[in-house]
Amino acid sequence: MIFLPCSEATLLMEKRNAENISSKENWKLSLHLKICKWCRAYKEKLEILDDILKRKLSQKENIEINHSEIQGFKDKVIKNLDI
């Protein structure tokens, strides 16, 4: 499949922030982002949140990260985007 559904595009954006994605995945995501204004908006918000979190983490080294809370937050964002 050449066209990527929004649900897969958002997952690839999350994956790309956490680790590297393949060239094929990156190509499909780039193509999807050129077409889909909703996923471009999601990407912008994701980048803003990541920047905020990085700044907060750099200010306080003793912060414990609860991955289930982070995933819950991401799930709420995706649900609110109604993807």
Image (spheres, helix red, strand yellow):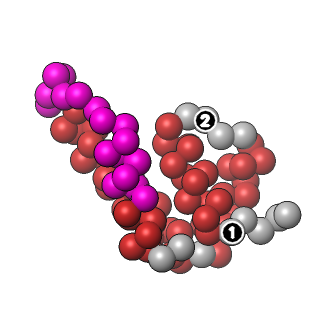
Identify residue type, mark 2. Asn
Q: Secondary structure at mark 2?
A: loop
Residue in the picture at 37% in, 63% down: 76
Residue in the picture at 19% in, 28% down: 63
- Left or right relative to 68: residue 36: right
Image coordinates for residue 46, horizontal then vertical, percent: 40, 56
Identify residue type, mark 1. Pro
Q: Secondary structure at mark 1?
A: loop
Residue 26 - label: none
Image coordinates for residue 10, horizontal then vertical, percent: 55, 59
The residue under label 1 is 5
The residue under label 2 is 20
Res 57 → quadrant: top left
Residue in the picture at 16% in, 22% down: 62
Res 36 → quadrant: bottom right
Image coordinates for residue 18, horizontal then vertical, percent: 50, 37
Nearer the observer: mark 2 or 1; the answer is 1
Mark 1 is surrounded, within 10 Å at the Cα level, by few (under 14), some (14 to 19) or many (20 or more) other residues, namely some
Range of magenta residues: 58-75
Above or below — where is 75 with respect to 71? below
Above or below — where is 7 with respect to 22? below
Q: Tell whether position 19 is magenta.
A: no
Question: Which of pointers 2 and 1 lies earlier in the amino acid sequence?
Answer: 1
